Image: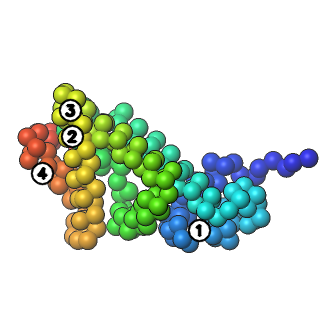
Amino acid sequence: MARGKTISDSDLLDRLVDTIGRIGPAGLSFAVASRAAGLSPATLVQRFGARDAMVEATLLRAWDLLDARTKAADQEASHDPAGAIALLIALMPGETAEHSVADGLLLLREDFRNPRLRARGAAWGDRLAEALGRRLSDDAEDAGRLGRQMANVWQGAVIWWAFKPDTDPETAIRTALEDWCRTAGLTPAASRT
């Protein structure tokens, strides 16, 4: 008779998402995952089969979590340029931004190498650009172009802020996005939601 799981797959993957975020994909071994999850390495081998499968499952779970955060931010943000900025600010890691940017680049490296993870990232980028575009223009073609541009500016602003974190990340990123909106002929309202 098979024993029941003491930790559900989603709870296990959530623990591993936190771990991989701190140590990067290369550091996630069965031994490390065992300590993080409170399960034996043998149990993890039974669940995943191979270390690469465990890393992939963990990073797919990270994409699931980001999809959920993006959907929630999309539902909460106003439908104007200020709402587009608020949506992107809601997706930022907050107090751990500097640490998260550096570690996030390690995760992205793995995402770029794995076709399934790369496809998830591309799909998320398309959904994000669409959500932003709806807030920037009523014209579908302009909305698509502006939404993608704003997502690009956001990611670039996050990376450049990490090189020179002389102010808090939210202020720096918000300023960059507001400047881009003005350059694009959009008026970012003073809303700080």
How many other residues sit within 10 Å of disc 1, few (<14), some (14-19) or many (≥20)?
A: many
Q: Position of residue 141 (x, y in %)?
A: 20, 32
In-front residue for pair 172/27: 27
Location of residue 165 with respect to 183 vertically, above or below: below
Furthest toward the top, the residue is 138
Determine whether label 3 and label 2 are within 8 Å by CB: yes
Which of marks 2 and 4 precedes in the sequence?
2
Q: Which amino acid lies under the numbered mark 2 shown in the image of this protein?
A: Arg
Q: Which residue is mark 1?
A: 28
Q: Which amino acid lies under the numbered mark 4 shown in the image of this protein?
A: Asp
At a point 36% along the width and 64% down the height, the residue shown is 101
Badge 1 marks a residue whose secondary structure is loop
Tell me the CA gap for discs 4 and 3. 22 Å
Give the mark toward the camera: 4 or 2: 2
Badge 2 marks a residue whose secondary structure is helix
Q: Which residue is mark 4?
A: 179
